[in-house]
């Protein structure tokens, strides 16, 4: 089994930040700087074209660490962040930009590309989870959650379906085409977010994915606004949702 290697460490505003490498896959682990007790782990998937330290990732991490003392881990997805792009990545991104410039549908390209990234990322995430659970402050018996919007959902749905250690997930804003089979295998509690006026992922597509989850407990959060108008109060909602299902009290809200 590959080992996890911490490469840098820093602390600010009560949050400890540790960069790591899992093999050649870069990631970051955020934790409470107090390190007082064992706490659950939340895995986060970033959006397309973003990276592990994107402001959305850092903002969510701060809310999860400050709000519940969670440990929060993010990996750079294949072809993103500090990971080199392959020739395949470059071709798919060029096709996407061409379609966007011409006003043509982008869904077929994004769905195809993200499905390929998921094939690569799910094994990486599972190996990283193995390694993170060897840390005494996380432990092998602690509950695990997942959060990911857009591409984070495209990678997260197959991960949650494959990984029984994940006990609850926050997902949303992604086309369902390549995700139906995996979604039907998911029975853990789901909080699902969609933008009612999303110009990229139509509401009908989001509703179809929500409907596909086999979870007995699943909640739909539909907000007015476009794809990039994601309301920040949904971050607080996700903290409360994960706290409830991973057994943590909410001590602070942003």
Image (cartoon, grey):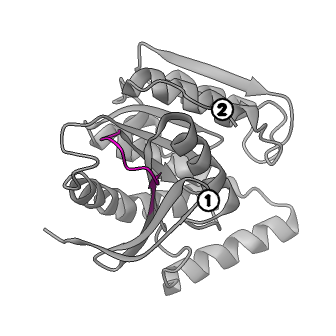
Q: How many neighbours does mark 1 have within 10 angstroms: few (below 14), some (14-19), or many (20 or more)?
A: many
Left or right position of 3 against 68: left
Q: Compared with residue 70, is residue 127 higher up or lower down, i.e. above or below?
A: below
- Which corner quadrant holds the C terminus? top right
Dot 1 falls on a residue whose secondary structure is: helix
Which range is magenta? Answer: 29-39
Residue at 52 percent of width and 83 percent of height: 85
Residue at 65 percent of width and 68 percent of height: 49
Can residue 205 be seen from the camera position used here? no
Left or right position of 213 against 141: right
Q: Compared with residue 60, is residue 116 higher up or lower down, i.e. above or below?
A: below
Residue 38 on the magenta span: yes
Mark 2 lies on residue: 253
| Magenta span main SS | loop
Residue 155 on the magenta span: no
Find residue 80 and report its horizontal and vertical position in percent. Answer: 55, 73
Residue 2 vs residue 209, the one in the foreground: 2
Q: Earlier in the sequence, mark 2 or mark 1?
A: 1
Residue 7 vs residue 3, the one in the foreground: 7
Find residue 52 and report its horizontal and vertical position in percent. Answer: 55, 65
Number of numbered discs: 2
Label of residue 110 in the image = 1
Single out the residue that lies furthest toward the top.
216
């Amino acid at each position: 089994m590959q080992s996890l290697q911490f490469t840098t460490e820093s602390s600010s505003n009560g949050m400890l930040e540790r960069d790591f490498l899992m093999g050649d896959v870069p990631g970051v682990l955020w934790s409470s700087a107090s390190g007082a007790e064992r706490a659950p782990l939340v895995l986060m998937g970033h959006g397309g074209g973003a990276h592990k330290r994107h402001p959305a990732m850092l903002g969510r991490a701060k809310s999860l660490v400050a709000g519940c003392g969670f440990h929060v881990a993010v990996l750079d997805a294949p072809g993103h962040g500090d990971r080199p792009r392959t020739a395949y990545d470059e071709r798919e991104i060029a096709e996407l930009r061409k379609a966007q410039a011409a006003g043509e549908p982008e869904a077929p390209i994004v769905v195809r590309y993200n499905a390929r990234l998921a094939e690569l990322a799910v094994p990486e995430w599972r190996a990283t989870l193995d390694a993170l659970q060897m840390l005494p402050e996380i432990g092998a018996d602690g509950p695990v959650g997942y959060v990911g919007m857009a591409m984070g959902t495209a990678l997260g749905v197959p991960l949650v379906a494959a990984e029984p250690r994940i006990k609850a997930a926050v997902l949303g804003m992604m086309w369902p085409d390549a995700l139906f089979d995996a979604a039907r295998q998911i029975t853990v509690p789901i909080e699902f977010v969609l933008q009612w006026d999303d110009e990229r992922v139509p509401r009908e597509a989001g509703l179809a994915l929500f409907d596909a989850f086999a979870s007995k407990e699943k909640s739909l959060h539909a907000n007015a606004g476009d794809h990039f108008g994601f309301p920040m109060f949904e971050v607080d909602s996700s903290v409360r949702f994960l706290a409830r299902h991973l057994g943590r009290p909410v001590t602070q809200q942003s």
